[in-house]
Image (spheres, rainbow, N blue to C red):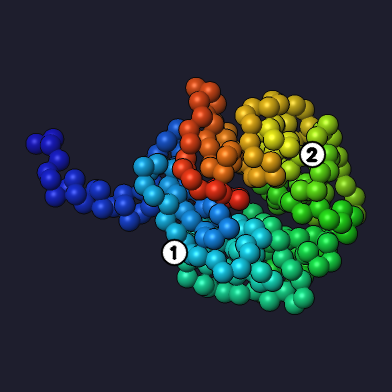
Amino acid sequence: RGVMKKPAIILLMLILLFTGCNIHVDGTESKAIIYYDSTLIALVYLNLKDLNPQVIRYTSGAVNGFDVFNDGKRLLVAESNLLNIYSISGQLIKTINLGTDVPYWPKIAPDGNKFIYYDNSSTYLKIADFNGNILKTITVLPTFKRTCWSPGGDHLLISNDGGNTTLYKIYISDLNTTHTIITSGTALDFAVYSSDGQKIIYNDSTDINSVTYNGDVIFTTLVSADITKPVYYNKTCTKVYYIAGGDIMEYNFKNSTVYQVTTGANANFFCLVP
């Protein structure tokens, strides 16, 4: 009595394996990362760091950004001149027709009903639904490509990969007015919110920095990172994920340690899986 039998142990191991290994770390469900390395899109579980990445799909054309749906089971991919929805296992679910637009850096809204993307043909940001209907066009910041929805979905963070030094906020209710959050001495890129909307983290040329939602500095130069590559807080803001030397790294605030998540990934960009 009180001792788990061998069949029960085997069953538990199988449950963990086939449910995505949802082991809890720091009080929250641990995440997976999906990354792109110029030839393939792959997934790696953060709680099974000794496993090889799982290939979702090999790519024949250029991938110009992707985002993961809130259910963690689907992926919105901008590739060549198309926007495709794939399952995490790599099965094509749907192709979204955007006419002559060339989509880059799609980001799904928190409500899951729409997304924003940069149209490389018109140089404008556009919001569309998943039937390809253009809902709104943002014209006040042409050539600005990177966006992040606020957790409530009422506004966007907008930054650029072209060397611009200002991070902007724009409300969905007023797409003609920009609000400056912070101006840096060097180019800032890939700005994203924390899950509670209280912090913003971004890549400042080659360093990872953070500010509050109203621009108060939290920290500068947390770690060095590859230029123009994404950065993310985890859900509880206890860790930061970024790319350095082509590999995805994990910085832990609790003990100020850095863990190398991938080896030889040569990652161009990545997303955390909810």
In the image, 96: left or right of 143?
A: left
Which labelled disc corresponds to residue 44? none
Tell me the SS state at disc 2.
loop
Q: Is residue 36 left or right of residue 158?
A: left
Residue drawn at 64 percent across, 40 percent down: 226
Q: Nearer the viewer, residue 92 or 22?
A: 92
Please name the residue shown 73% across and 51% down the image: 147
106 left or right, relative to 16: right
Assess whether mark 1 and mark 2 are in contact (beta carbons under 8 angstroms).
no
Q: Amino acid at mark 1?
A: Ser
Q: Secondary structure at mark 1?
A: loop
Quadrant into which the N terminus falls: top left
Residue 113 can be seen in this image: no
Q: Residues within 10 Å of mark 1 (few under 14, many from 20)?
A: some
Q: Is residue 270 visible?
A: yes
Q: Measuring 44% from the left and 59% from the top, which residue is drawn there?
A: 55
Image location (x, y in percent) of residue 64:
66, 60
Please state which of the two labelled residues, at mark 2 or mark 1, is closer to the viewer. Answer: 2
Which residue is the site of mark 2? 187
Kind of residue indicated by mark 2: Ala
Looking at the rendered structure, which numbered label has been put on residue 89? 1
- Identify the residue at the far left of this view: 1
Which residue is nearer to you in this view: 153 or 203? Answer: 203
Above or below for 258 versus 7: above
**Residue 241 place in picture, x, y as percent:** 56, 39
